[in-house]
Image (spheres, rainbow, N blue to C red):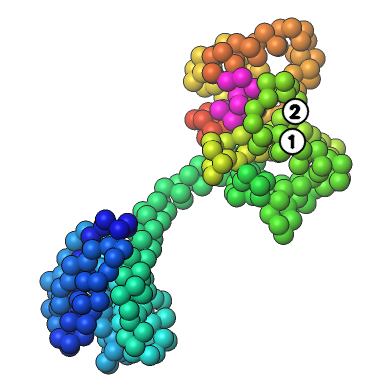
Amino acid sequence: MDENSTATVRFIGQKEEDAQQLSWLLSNASNAKFSFEHIACLDSFVKTGRDQQGEVIILDLMKNAEDRINAVSLLGEKVPHTPIVVLTDDDENIGREAIRLGAQDYLIKSQLTTDSMSRSLLNAIQRHRGHRQSAETAPLLDSATAVLNRLPIGVILVTADTKILFFNGKAKRYLEQNDGLIVGADRICRATLPGESRALAKLLSATLSPSDESKSEGDFAISLTRMESDYPLNVMVAPIGTGAAGKGAVLFVSDPAEPVELSVESICKLYGLTPAEGRLALGLTNGHKLDDLAEQWGVSMHTVRSQLRQIFRKTDTSRQSEVVKLILTGPAALQATSLL
């Protein structure tokens, strides 16, 4: 809320003199406009009260606090969209218990001032609004996490300062092995070998820096040696987000020893690719390099580069990492299953 906002304060308490004191204090507030309503009977309000936008409740807990504190939970159930602030004597323990039960803040009567009370009420409204939004978006975030956990490849999201924000189930397995890719107490992703760790840090830094057309595709991929496997971990990095606040990177981690079965036919239908282009897109998704694929298929580098240009054109991308990100976050990846 800003200084032009208006809020209705409902004081639920028996004493008229307390209501008058609160009303007078709020009438002098300069940071918002408050209207005031006194409700003497708590039980009556619990039975008939309704949520109304722009309201905040002050609940009197100065007398019989132990009996009345359960009213915080009752009010939370009756008017879940209305923030609650409790008014207590000098017992801060009652205030803290009320917050535990769902109140947004507490006021101590002997310390009441216009500024402290108006600030507490405004903060309670903002805090409650944030809690509501978190509760409303939690199912969506859970669903998004479930989708990422279904992806057949490791996915690690890092912030602009390269700290890990999220990793899916596949990436968790790689990290728990502490071989090739590790994460420290500082939540920064590193390679097992010091030299490769520096290279990975440089790769992340380059990905998070402003775009540079002179960078080659190889600047966005790296193979990390593993001590317990003949195969390295292949890591491809792509930028995500825009602006300083939302910028980050996604690491796609794959194990050549665990190829993923994606439907080439589905990839071709989704992105309008030819079978040869779909096969190349799948090869890139599994972490293979262009020259290795050309040698495996017995075709020239000119041929695979020509196919790659067509993939870029048809998918509106310009880098292999963008193609991989497109496929791995698309419908085709959700149908994939490990070959092992």
Give the percent coordinates (x, y) of residue 15.
Answer: 17, 88
Q: Would you place residue 302 above or below residue 249 in this image? A: above
Give the percent coordinates (x, y) of residue 98.
Answer: 36, 79
| Quadrant of the rendered image containing residue 56 | bottom left
| Quadrant of the rendered image containing residue 263 | top right
Is residue 50 found left or right of 240 in the rendered image? Answer: left
- Do the numbered discs 1 and 2 sit on residues whose CB atoms are within 8 Å? yes
For the C terminus, the quadrant is top right
Residue 57 badge: none
Q: Name the residue under label 1.
A: 203
| Quadrant of the rendered image containing residue 66 | bottom left
Q: Which residue is drawn at 35% across and 69% down?
A: 119
Q: What residue type is labelled 1?
A: Leu
Q: Which residue is drawn at 73% across and 31% down?
A: 221
Q: Which residue is drawn at 74% across and 56% down?
A: 184
Residue numbers of the magenta segment: 317-327
Is residue 271 found left or right of 219 in the rendered image? Answer: left
Q: What element carries label 2?
A: helix
Is residue 64 found left or right of 14 in the rendered image? Answer: right
In this rendering, the count of numbered labels is 2
Magenta stretch: dominant secondary structure: helix
Give the percent coordinates (x, y) of residue 74.
Answer: 26, 75
Q: How crowded is the residue under tag 1: few (<14 C-alpha within 10 Å), some, or many (20+)?
A: many
Q: Would you place residue 245 above or below residue 81 in this image? A: above
Q: Is mark 1 on a helix, strand or loop?
A: helix
The answer to which of marks 1 and 2 sits earlier in the sequence is 1
Q: Mark 2 points at which residue?
A: 219
Gap between marks 1 and 2 measured at Cα: 7 Å
Q: What residue type is labelled 2?
A: Asp
Q: Residue at x 66, y 18 (%)?
A: 280
In this orientation, does residue 34 appear?
yes
